[in-house]
Amino acid sequence: MGITIKMLTGDHEAIAKEIAGQLDLGLKIVTAESIFDADEKIDKLAEIKKADGFARIFPEHKFEIVKTLQDDDHIVGMTGDGVNDAPALKQADIGISVSGATDAVRAAATPVLTAPGLSVITHALEESRRIFERMTGYAIYRIAETTRVLLFMTASILVFDFYPVTAVLIVLLALLNDFPIMMIAYDHMPVASKPVRWDMKRVLAVASALGVLGVFSSFSVRWPLSTDGSWPRPAGRWR
């Protein structure tokens, strides 16, 4: 499911339709009373989804629209500048206070826009999704590296009776691992076209596969080049 934009305004529906037409938001504008003051048997969620915008609504209606969409597992973002927007902004997954908003809205919102216009929101969404992908990459890298080191050292000790890493190498390993981790912050990540969420099953599956593959890679590097195929040992054996 992509992004859907809906207008919520307390103005008359004629004004709402004119503004919605200019912004190409859709002309199916309904009034609050047609949904919230109608028969209780009406499917409010279906009506909210079908509408392109809502006119003549009160603060409690805005709040209920946000809550109804959230109960249907939607990620809801909202912008506003007046006191009547504060309850819905507080309830939304992300409440955005536009430039010049009242103090109540600024307190209820998560980010507060300091530049005029709404194009800032688009740039903020793009950057936040890039950051999310970088966080996913960091989680995969960290889990994969931890898996690789632990399995490699455990197999070396238990199977080959060989301790592969000294205290100095452990310190060097920790330091050198930090360099690729820092570079993740500068990765040119693609911007997802849809809202993103954590998929821990995918993260763990990819990280585990890379970690196990790294174990085989580490053993292939350490495998001796001698003709007898014996495992190379340092000066002392671990016991």
Image (cartoon, grey):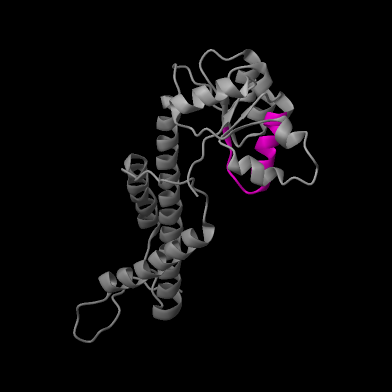
Q: What residue do we see at 67% from left, 23% from top? A: 56
Q: Position of residue 45 (x, y in %)?
A: 67, 45
Q: Residue furthest front?
A: 14
Residue 222 seen: yes
Q: Which residue occupies the foreground of this view, 129 or 50?
A: 50
Q: Which residues fall within the magenta stretch?
A: 61-77
Residue 43 is a magenta residue: no
The image quarter containing residue 218 is bottom left
Q: Position of residue 63 (x, y in %)?
A: 70, 31
The image quarter containing residue 29 is: top right
Q: Is residue 70 visible?
A: no
Q: Residue furthest right?
A: 40
Question: Which residue corresponds to the image point at 38% horizontal and 65% vertical from the top-left?
Answer: 210
- Residue found at x 32% / y 43%: 187
Across and down, in percent, residue 4 comes to 51, 40
Vertical side of 131 occupied by 24: above or below? above
User: Which one is nearer the viewer's eye here, 9 or 211?
Assistant: 9
How many numbered marks appear? 0
